[in-house]
Image: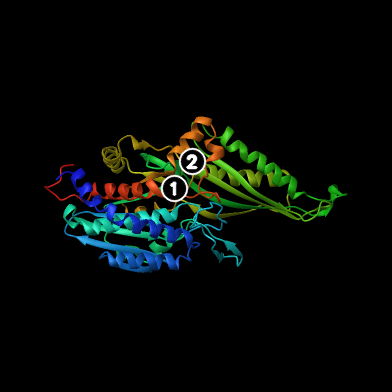
Amino acid sequence: MTLTDSTDAVLAGLGGIRSGLEDVYKDVHAHPELGHQEHRTATRVAELLRNGGYRVHEGIGGTGVVGVLANGEGPTVLLRADMDALPIREETGLPYASTAEATDTSGRRVPVAHACGHDMHVACLLGAARLMAAAPGAWQGTLVALFQPAEEPGDGADRMLTDHLSDLVPHPDVAFAQHVLPHPAGQVGTRSGAFLSAADNVKITVHGRGAHGSAPQAAIDPVVIASMIVVRLQTIVSRELAATQPVVVTVGSVQAGTSGNVIPESAELLVNVRTYDDETRRAVLSAVRRIARAECDASGATRAPQIEEGTSFPPTVNDDGVTREVTAAFAAKFGERAVTAELQSASEDFSRIPDAFGTPYTYWALGCIDPDTYQAARQRGTVAQEIPVNHSARFAPVLQPTLDTGVQALVTAAITHLGRPGRISR
């Protein structure tokens, strides 16, 4: 039995569960939950895993769920899906569109929608888990199906690890994850090495001296200082890094003052930095701090700026060997629909889990836009304008072939390591 034979044996049952799996997807899509609030989703996931014969652990890191299925001796493969949604009002017009609302961490009532595709990730992993359980003769080893909360806030993986995840599951030999992206549905894209960027959020508070707008000589204007910092930060990428080094520095928020004729006491900047390796990350963050302090000093600020580090995400760096194996398996399964993924400036916290175990991993892109719609926009040169992207109120994966392809990709990747020793030729 070859790897292809094993994969086909597992996926032979897909037609029989497709309708039910589509219903699960629609249900999760219509009932989105914010990070750390995924109680309904987690309950549904745990129930379906138990029905498939998995040993289930619930409430890991709050709402995390893990199912473990042992099927004889062999490697352990971890498959991960994230479950949380976003505080966005859905505008897709789908018959199963979300009308949900929730209270966020600041106490505000906000609309909630699966505008990033985590609902698709959940449905795909549930489908793969069910098919693997139904075909034990096609593989050997242990499958770990991990459903992670709170990817969007960036602390879901850490909370699962802090809550003793490593005591609940066997040590994985390899880990896999996927994410829907605005590419043609049916495509799967792999990439060795750096794939997703690290992301660091920094809050800078500049302290000046307030005064009346008619008497600027009596003030140390924090708005001017903040403006100089904003401009100077742009030179990090343009003048301190090689042109071939991909880095993004964004000032997403500048807050100061309440009136046009009052020079305020302080100004606040929120900065986002995206890099792809630890050395560059350290250098850019150091430059942000240096520039903020120097501009304040140059303007005679009343005191040094407060520089606070906020939410951060690690880079996603795919293991070369594991990625080669999965790429070859995808090429055999999907043919020309298996492509090379482009470097992405989005960020994820998935890698914290395999990194904590010292486990190699690969993470791939799953296309989710209707292929005809995408191709028409491409021919017009209007993909950026017409195709909704993740976190857009209009973003929602086309149900098929996205769901089938996501299930097939997870099963295909898992089988690369769960073949029967001596019976499967690699």
**In the foreground, 18 or 133:** 18
Residue found at the far right of this picture: 214
Specify which label sits upstream in the sequence, 2 or 1.
2
Q: Position of residue 311 (x, y in %)?
A: 52, 55
Quadrant for the N terminus in the image? top left
User: Which amino acid type corresponds to the residue marked 2 in the rendered image?
Assistant: Thr
- SS for dot 1: loop
Q: Where is residue 197 in the image (x, y as percent from the top left)?
A: 47, 44
Q: Residues within 10 Å of mark 1 (few under 14, many from 20)?
A: some
Q: Which mark is residue 398?
A: 1
Tell me: residue 216, above or below residue 41.
Answer: above
Q: Which residue is drawn at 52% across and 36% down?
A: 383
Q: Which mark is residue 9?
A: none
* Left or right: residue 294 compared with residue 168: right
Corner quadrant of residue 326: top left
Res 375 visible: yes
Query: What is the spatial separation of the Cα atoms under label 2 and label 1, in whole angstroms?
Result: 37 Å
* Left or right: residue 254 compared with residue 182: right
**In the foreground, 57 or 173:** 57
Marks 2, 1: nearer the viewer: 1
Q: Position of residue 34 (x, y in %)?
A: 50, 62
Tell me: residue 314, above or below residue 30.
Answer: above
* Left or right: residue 62 compared with residue 107: left
- SS for dot 2: helix
Corner quadrant of residue 259: bottom right
User: Which amino acid type corresponds to the residue marked 1 in the rendered image?
Assistant: Val
Q: Which residue is drawn at 72% across and 46% down?
A: 225
Residue matched to label 2: 280
Q: Where is residue 72 in the image (x, y as percent from the top left)?
A: 16, 59
